[in-house]
Amino acid sequence: MKTNLLMNFSVDKENCTVNVKREFNAPIANVWSAWTEVEILDQWWAPTPWKSKTKRMDFKVGGRRLYAMVGPEGQERWSFFDYTSISPKTNFKHSSTFCDSEENPDPNLGSSYWDLTFSEQGNSTIVDIAIRRDSLAELEMIIEMGFKEGFTIAMEGLDKIFEAGK
């Protein structure tokens, strides 16, 4: 099993985009399932000590995932994904919008537009992620909110799921 897994995180201010390239010690089918099946997604999506709690998820073009990240004191941060494109085990795209528990978007936080591409490389899987914001100010805001640190912790949580499954 490979122990030095690839993790590249870069910010492209000109295009208001965060780019993440992440390697996982698992076959593409397992990695795809971890990103697209609520039972697995909720195990790792939030950075520890937070937990992901999905209210509903319909992984199809035009479908939505409504979920909360629940903090250690019970605080909730709601978001929804709207799935716009799906090519099984290859790519999917969605918008991600902060909202309240009734799905009313937070006008102060805007949306992110995610494009995730999955590819096998030997015994591992690479996930290339481009996350675009509408403006540089929005991009800088999510970076300042700790996106890189939180996302890195979540990716490490996903690694643990794959390790436990070996």
Image: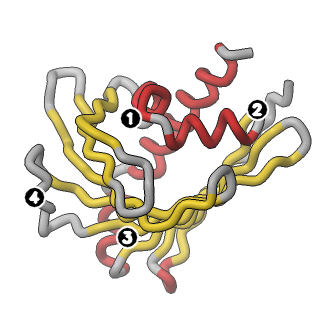
In which quadrant of the rendered view does residue 57 lie?
top left
- Which residue appears at 44% of the width and 54% of the height? 60
Which residue position is annotated with label 1? 46
Above or below for 49 versus 83: above
Residue 139's tag is 3
Crowding at dot 3, Cα within 10 Å, few <14 / some 14-19 / many 20+, comes out as: many
Residues at marks 1 and 2, CA–CA distance in whole angstroms: 20 Å
Choose the circle earlier in sequence order: 1 or 4. Answer: 1
Which residue position is annotated with label 2? 25
Crowding at dot 2, Cα within 10 Å, few <14 / some 14-19 / many 20+, comes out as: many
Residues at marks 3 and 4, CA–CA distance in whole angstroms: 21 Å
Q: Inspect the image, locate mark 1, and give the three-letter code of the amino acid beneath it.
A: Ala
Residues at marks 1 and 4, CA–CA distance in whole angstroms: 21 Å
Choose the circle earlier in sequence order: 3 or 4. Answer: 4
Which residue position is annotated with label 4? 104
Residue 160's tag is none
Q: Quadrant of the C terminus?
A: top right
- Which residue appears at 85% of the width and 24% of the height? 1
Secondary structure beneath label 3: helix
Choose the circle earlier in sequence order: 3 or 1. Answer: 1
- Which residue appears at 76% of the width and 53% of the height? 119
Secondary structure beneath label 4: loop
Residue in the foreground of this view, choosing between 130 and 11: 130
Point out the frontmost of discs 3 and 1.
Answer: 1
Choose the circle earlier in sequence order: 2 or 3. Answer: 2
